[in-house]
């Protein structure tokens, strides 16, 4: 008997459709062993759709996506500087709209340096950490404004909003995650010495919630110092919990030191299950290399592993990760494979490992 | 005939006094050749002073510092977590208070990888860029607040304020700097796709001011992407202009990739000359290694070079930089010298080079 999962698939723009095709290939290959029957609905959304119809995300699309069990997203965004997109903000209107409306308060971004991957760091050490980035508050709320725009008297403000409700729940998730990991260590990253109000609420809630997790070691770093450690001693980190903007910055940097955001997966998670969670590679739509079958589908495939974790089949997720790890170890910089050849190889590897 | 410069010296806490002593040593050695007579006033400020007197920065001190021609600062800040400092914010009350009151709207932070320095990057390339960080606006303004503090209904906000007046002047400074450099390239770093109001004013003013500098090539990166390039291709940067918070983050990362913030100098500059500019190493007070004569005074000495540039004697500043470069090339990780031995060596080198 298999469980039916209604999956909303948003391939998006640029390389999105190519990498999502490979992710779906791998998901379809593992679904039967995971006891899952995946029913996919494709949504055509992103810059391409906007240019065709003028819509970024209609209420109808949003309601329809919401009614699914989970979402797989490729990447959205048009060619940078395209004048036809000047008045559309695909990021705020689509990606952030989904994250906020679907209450994705945990943005989960694991970082590992896979054997065989070239890190730009000469001596990265044994890197294996997860950034738990808050997804629904902070400077991302869009609560800003400007007056006298375009004049010498313009004032433009952005408000970072942080609530005890919002911070407590993501901090709790991070502590639970830290407790489940061997190192049991949590690092809060913020800028409490300057952003005293926002920093204060984060610090206090890490203290309060932390009291319930006496076996988790807690530590604090200012965001500027955290970037230093990410390049000088990334192996020191286990679970990092941080706000929406700092999380954005730290996870791109984490992707870079671990050999490129072509390998970085993420889950936008609503742990309460009230809304579908969304899984997506950290990379963007890279329109310059779209359609050439040269994009790396690994991050999209690893996002499927996060989806499988979320669906409660971590062993199958592990099989996908093992196949990815093995595949990465065979890669040769001088003989790259096509996007679909990489997907085929990983699909075949998981299939044969599950058949055993 | 020599010009008298009244210099306010704030050694500060931790390693501050040790590194400032070496910086002053070098400054005194070059002053006569630079046609300068340096009159120093010492200000005892920082965590130590606060613990003794309860004062962070009195109006009297502030007025007195303001009446000087320039400021040399070591580092301020007590032992992290010291409960006696819980209600003092030395950073906001002293360091940021000086930067804001003295209208230090340009925070200048050059990054070079000196020959012989070990970068954590295996292949950094030829790195030589300057971050022009805005110093008086953005999320640093302290314009935030919180209600229902400590309750489950707490809301804590921070407001980033960006004005055409404030952005235009720092952007103009950055363009002028870029125009004076061989590469003539300026990169704006922001997060315009999310922080649309603050990002909008920065983008527009870079466009407007840029039109007056047709020979400067302009480019834009989101802050997250900028951190990636800082580890994968830092040699691509020439002049970066960015806001107060992004500048804080990028310059610590820049310090790390160039071999440690022990080498990173900064100038908090009021280009109008209405207030004294302030020169300081990027590093903090490092109380754990204070008083042991093991701190590296290089960043403080390079801050003196920035002071000399500011005083209009760039050739003498160059002599200091050359002596530092030569000294760094001789350093051996396994036989470190004391703080004052490093200062002596650099002082002797500049003295003999000026005598020639
Ligand atoms: C595209 C952009 C809005 C997004 C973000 O800032 O969150 C991206 O950088 C990410 O990290 O997923
Ligand atoms: C100490 C702190 C307030 C300061 C800042 O954030 O500006 C420091 O990190 C710096 O970069 O000079």
Image (cartoon, coloured by chain):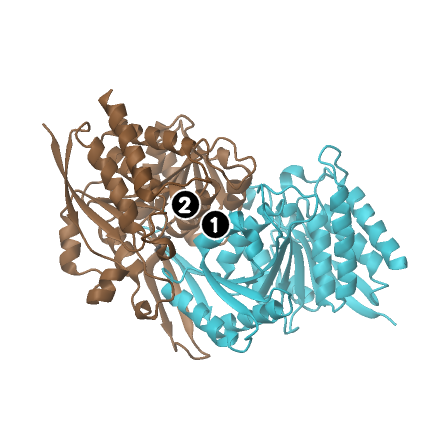
Chain colours: A brown, B cyan
Check the image and report above or below for B180 versus B11: below
Q: Quadrant of residue B116?
A: top right
Residue B12 percent location from the top left of the image: 67, 51
Q: CA distance from mark 2 to mark 1?
A: 9 Å
Mark 1, residue position: B228
Viewer-nearest residue: B143 or A288: A288
Marks 2 & 1, CB-CB < 8 Å contact: yes
Q: Is residue B143 left or right of residue B107?
A: left
User: A277 or A283, which is in the foreground?
Assistant: A283
Badge 2 is on which residue?
A: A261
Can you say which quadrant of the picture contains the N terminus of chain B? Answer: bottom right
The x, y position of residue B345, in whole percent, is 82, 46
In this view of the protein, which residue sits in the foreground, A354 or A113?
A: A354
Viewed as shown, does residue A298 lie left or right of A252?
Answer: left
Do we see residue B53 in this rendering?
yes
| Residue at left offset 52%, top offset 35% | A124
The residue depicted at 84 percent of the width and 68 percent of the height is B35
Q: Is residue B71 left or right of residue A284?
A: right
């Amino acid at each position: 008997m298999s469980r039916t999962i209604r999956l909303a698939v948003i391939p998006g723009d640029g390389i999105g459709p190519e990498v999502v095709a490979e992710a779906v290939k791998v998901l379809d290959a593992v679904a039967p062993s995971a006891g899952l029957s995946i029913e996919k609905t494709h949504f055509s959304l992103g810059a391409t759709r906007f240019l065709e119809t003028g819509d970024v995300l209609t209420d109808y699309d949003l309601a329809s996506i919401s009614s699914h069990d989970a979402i797989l997203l490729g990447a959205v965004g048009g060619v940078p500087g395209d004048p036809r997109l000047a008045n559309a903000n695909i990021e705020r209107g689509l990606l952030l709209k989904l994250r906020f409306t679907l209450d994705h308060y945990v943005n989960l971004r694991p970082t590992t340096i896979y054997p065989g991957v070239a890190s730009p760091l000469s001596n990265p050490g044994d890197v294996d950490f997860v950034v738990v980035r808050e997804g629904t508050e902070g400077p991302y709320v869009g609560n800003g404004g400007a007056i006298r725009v375009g004049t010498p008297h313009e004032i433009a403000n952005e408000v970072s909003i942080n609530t005890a409700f919002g911070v407590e729940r993501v901090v709790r998730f991070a502590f639970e995650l830290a407790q489940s990991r061997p190192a049991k260590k949590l690092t809060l990253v913020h800028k409490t010495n300057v952003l005293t109000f926002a920093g204060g609420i984060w610090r206090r809630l890490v203290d309060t919630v932390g009291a319930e997790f006496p076996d988790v070691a807690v530590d604090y770093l200012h965001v500027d110092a955290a970037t230093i450690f990410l390049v000088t001693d990334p192996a020191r980190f286990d679970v990092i919990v941080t706000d929406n903007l700092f999380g954005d910055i730290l996870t791109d940097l984490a992707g870079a030191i671990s050999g490129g955001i072509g390998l970085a997966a993420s889950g936008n998670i609503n742990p309460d299950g009230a809304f579908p969670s969304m899984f997506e590679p950290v990379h963007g739509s890279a329109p310059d290399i779209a359609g050439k079958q040269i994009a790396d589908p690994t991050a999209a495939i690893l996002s499927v592993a996060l989806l499988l974790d979320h669906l409660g089949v971590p062993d199958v997720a592990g099989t996908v990760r093992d196949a990815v790890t093995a595949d990465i170890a065979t890669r040769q910089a001088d003989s790259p494979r096509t996007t679909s050849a990489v997907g085929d190889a990983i699909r075949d590897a998981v299939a044969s490992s599950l058949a055993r």
